[in-house]
Amino acid sequence: MTITAPPASGLDAPPPRPTRRPRAVRSAVRRVTGVTAPYGFVAPFFMIFFVFGLFPMAYTFWVSLTDRDLLRPNDAKMIGLRNYTDLLHDEFFWNAVKNTFELMLLCTVPQLALALILAHILNARLRGRMLFRMGVLLPNITSIVAVTIVFGQLFSRDFGLFNWLLGLVGIDNVNWQAGEWSSKIAIAMMVVWRWTGYNALIYLAAMQAIPKEQFEAAAIDGAGTWRQLWHVTLPALRPTIAFTALVSLIGQIQLFTEPLLFDISPGSVSGGTDRQFQTLALFLYEEGFRLRHFGYGSAVAWLMFLLTVILAAFAYFLTRGGARIRGSSLIGGASRGGPGTRRLGHRGPRRPSSGGSAGRATGQAAARPAGQAAGRPAEAAASPAPAPAPASANDDSTPGGSS
Amino acid sequence: MSVTIDKAGDADTASPQAPPRSGGWRRLRRPAPGPASEDERRGLWRYPFLIVVVLLSAFPVYWTFMIPSRTNDVVGQTPPPLLPGGHFFENARRVFDTVEFEKALINSLVVAGSITLCTLFFCSLAGFAFAKLRFRGRGALLAIVIATMMVPVQLGIIPLYIEMQKFGWANHLIAVIAPTAVTAFGVVFMRQYTEQAIPDELLEAGRMDGCSTFGLYWHVVLPGLRPAMAVLGLLTFMQAWNDFMWPLIVLSPQNPTVQVALSTLSAGYYRDNTLVLAGTALGTLPVLLIFAVFGRQIISGIMEGAVKG
């Protein structure tokens, strides 16, 4: 396993080729480089991270305690927490918080729901599936700038395609940018368009790691494809869904390009005339780089970070809570499948071993046989393994099943 | 999340019942499914849905290229035109006359190219160390790497800007390249792949032949990492090409990347749709070409990364 351990004696590594350097010296050199080389290999990451990541982060906190601007860059007055107290009384800040959260919901929920459905449709033996996969991923490779420009054109009031289509069904031209909700819906559509396919591919990968027998068992028990999605796929995908939700929420906190470029007044960074779609990131940009309030902007950055940490902790406890519920099935013999699955379970007296094989390498191994011993074999199908399924749970037809 | 990645990886190699891995990710490229089964005929309803989804996905991209092929008069009509015309090159030329687009293209190429090369080299090096070398503090260092993936980039953006000014890098491309020259995602990605694709015996054999540790990386590990390098390289290049906020802050409109030039264009010439979208089309073309050629690898990379968490 370890290959850096320097040879303890000459027996370990007889030099196959004669070298000019005596063996003792060589092994001493080897010993030194063997010990330091790994640190040298990982050093670039840590150097870059320290200089451009950690230090600016810590420095942000210090800057946020000062009052400084670009006109007097070296004249920073220490003002303690006043930037923070000012922020908490700044209605523009709270407006940005509100907008960010509203956009977060509008972007994340439809995006993940659509991705799940799309992944379920993709999860079958399809002809030309690589073409379909490329098709759904296409939006994600275009730049956010390009997406916002194109959608801005599609959403334009007088010549936009969307308003023309709405006109066909008798709806008057909508001034998308001006409205409190219409502007947010437009921005959410850009985000949803760009990210749904990407998340669908992630869900698809996780779905393919679910042991096939679980679907087969459900099918034999009479569950159609959509009930399989609900009763087999969704429970198995919970960790993946939690993960994508977290990533997506953190992404939405940083939503910047769309609200910046969707604003049609040139050079505006206020997120619409009434700040109706100014997000926190845009507010940070306005304060920090337009108004050059470095201290105030840094305080915004720290509050955004705080928000991110809270969200991450929330997601962590949600998934941990999920794990606890799964663990409790160890005692109770898993009864969270709901009435639907239980009915399915009683109709199929089969699969004495497949449930065990599905859970073999997971932490739930003990839960499955317990459920079976209680005379409910199909419970194993109703509470499948967590999504990042271990390698041994996969057969050859589940690509990407390696965890 | 973070810790399970590590453990899963270790368990993977240690687990005796794990089937031998042939070619790591190649399994995604399975041959086409066999003859139509009962299953397949029942799944026919999926195709119309998927075709609609793909059309919706492709439509805005089509629009990006269709609008600049018309003139502004036609674009302003109701209903808007839906088919391409013959004015694309004319509008594309106007883009180069209006903003520093040539410079922007070169800048973006330099930035994305350098970031990609640096990322590939440093990430594979660190990934190799984390996967195969044993050293004090390895676990803790890896945990730090993974933890940094969760830190939002915007947190340090103001001091980063101050820092770049102090370095005298503001408005230079190096200011865009340096902060992303090696990413935590890349390190974790490479570590994962090295772990499963490079057998320990190969490394021991290399040791026997008298390779130094770096020699092992260069002669043994690097050739074996080619498929992963391709995927990481493609993802990194596209991400660097599309990056916007930091280049916008640190570069000037006179020395822009493509995305910064596009934002200047769209802010200044809002009414000139064919001009703005011609620029957008030109700026999107490189990633579209990459996607057309390497889409398969990109997709397998995303899906593999997903399962690994």
Image (cartoon, rainbow, N blue to C red):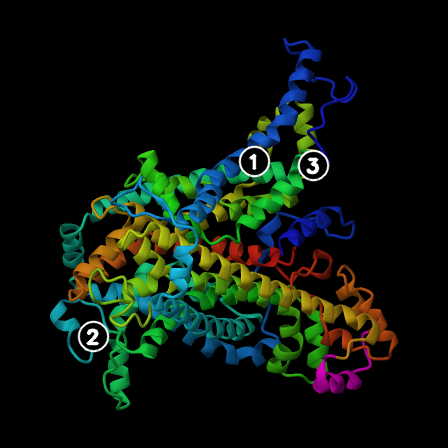
Q: Earlier in the sequence, mark 2 or mark 3?
A: 2
Relative image position of residue A87 (x, y in whole percent): 39, 61
Q: Is residue B13 left or right of residue B236?
A: right
Q: Disc 2 marks which residue?
A: B81
Which residue occupies 18% across, 67% down?
B85
Magenta stretch: give its range.
A336-353
Q: Which mark is residue A42?
A: 1
Q: Disc 3 marks which residue?
A: B200
Q: CA distance from mark 2 to mark 3?
A: 61 Å
Amino acid under label 2?
Answer: Pro
SS state under label 1: helix
Which residue occupies 17% across, 59% down?
B268
* Neighbours of disc 3 within 10 Å: few (<14), some (14-19), many (20+): some
Tag 2 subunit? B
Tag 3 subunit? B
Q: Nearer the viewer, mark 1 or mark 3?
A: 1
Relative image position of residue A123 (x, y in whole percent): 57, 70
Same subunit, labels 1 and 3: the answer reads no
Is B281 or A162 nearer to us in this picture? A162
SS state under label 3: helix
Tag 1 subunit? A
* Neighbours of disc 2 within 10 Å: few (<14), some (14-19), many (20+): some
